[in-house]
Amino acid sequence: MEIEKLFSDISSYIWGFPLIILLIGGGLYLITYSRFIPFRYFFHAIDIVRGKYDNSNDKGEISHFAALSTALSATVGMGNIAGVSVAISIGGPGAIFWMWISGIIGMSTKFFTSSLAIMYRGKDSNGNIQGGPMYFITEGLGSKWKPLAIFFSVCGLIGALPVFNVNQLKQAINDILLIPMGYEVTLQSNLLIGLVLIIITSFVILGGLKRISAVASKLVPLMVLIYMISVITIIVINIEELPYYIKLIFYDAFTALNYRGDSVTGGVVGSLIILGIRRGAFSNEAGIGMAPMAHGAAKTNSPIREGLVAMLGPAIDTLFVCTLTALAILITGVWKTDLNGVTLTAAAFSNSLPLIGRYLLLICVIVFSISSLFTYSYYGTKCLSYLLGEKNKKYYNYIYIISIMLGATTSLSLMINLIDTFFALMAIPTMLATIILAPKVVEALKKYKT
């Protein structure tokens, strides 16, 4: 319990107003500085993802679609299912409004960070082209900024660990499948879940990025479709409640009448804003620096083109999928219970789809969680490769695989505060470098022709 309190205190301290100003203030600066131009290319970005502008002679490893799928496999998943329910259980309906703000600003942030990931690609110790914050910091700002790149990579080693996803997958399997079937949940049963996940994850992640992106490209779109159809069905069944809760989201965002957490600087409304931004950042990772590592591997010579593709991530993730999850939790009334995490979302599914709801959710949770495991391992190996050389990156996978067992046997609060802490620390170098290099992206954006 002391470890839990320690990470809770650290997480709350780091996620104070200075970081919120850096993420949200920095994002607003990027939006206004670019004069909203990236948003005008929204439908063009969809054409890019469809492969209309693919060129096999461009540098890189994977297609635009595979890069977006890889990035989304990390964000569309437990952040949408469990992260949203955590936000509502603590902050009430108003937390969703601030997640929306985070998502809109995050679209601009992801455009800039992923454009920079292509614009300033570096080379690893084997001479292979690589992208990501650690590379655009050193290539774009110069070697004197390398300590910032090292800081990002060290934090990324822990931030990429799969402990939250595994924790919530374990909770879903226990609450949706094992307990209703009469099985007793014990340390041994959790260890068995962890062992099965280790076997599945090992098979994919030891195959490298191409195998990860191939699996993600097939799994993610299908599961997103199944999940969205399920949630839309729940909303249609409870459609009479929808207008009330849409109004409540906006009203509660500025009154914080349903906030249950601890108050920090700024009172309950300030605390609610921070909660929404934190959960939004966890959901879409904009400004954190993870996704640019996937987009930096895209097969393209156009930084702006990949930035536009990356911009779709928060729109799909936070503005669409998170909103559907939130509405399902709210209009079914389960948000008023003491449930938390994925169990709260499961209650919403069971409430409106009593025969198959919880099992549909379990299938989605399993696929989302496992696909996230694949992608986060790639992010971690990129960080270790930068720090210790390409030949040593494989050792991260062994640490990563062991950490799956940690996630399967520990509490939700400890895992979410651990990841929140290192996400916050990763955002500092990512956003600082992005703001400094923003003029380079805007210059390229003005010259960009579709």
Image (cartoon, rainbow, N blue to C red):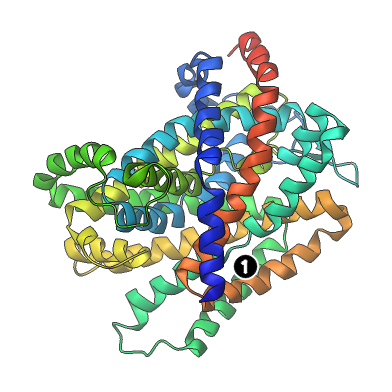
Residue 105 vertical placement versus 257 (above, below): above
Residue 144 visible? The answer is: yes
Q: Residue at left 69%, top 39%?
A: 429
Q: Position of residue 296 (x, y in %)?
A: 70, 37
Q: Nearer the viewer, residue 67 or 50?
A: 67
Q: Residue at left 62%, top 75%?
A: 199
The answer to which quarter of the image holds residue 247 is: top left
**Residue on which disc 1 sits:** 201
Q: State left or right for residue 342 relative to residue 107.
A: left
Q: Residue furthest right?
A: 126
Q: Residue at left 33%, top 74%?
A: 176
Q: Nearer the viewer, residue 9 or 197?
A: 9
Q: Position of residue 400 (x, y in %)?
A: 68, 66
Q: Position of residue 186 (x, y in %)?
A: 45, 89
Residue 370 visible? The answer is: no
Q: Nearer the viewer, residue 3 or 356?
A: 3
Q: State left or right for residue 101 relative to residue 2.
A: left
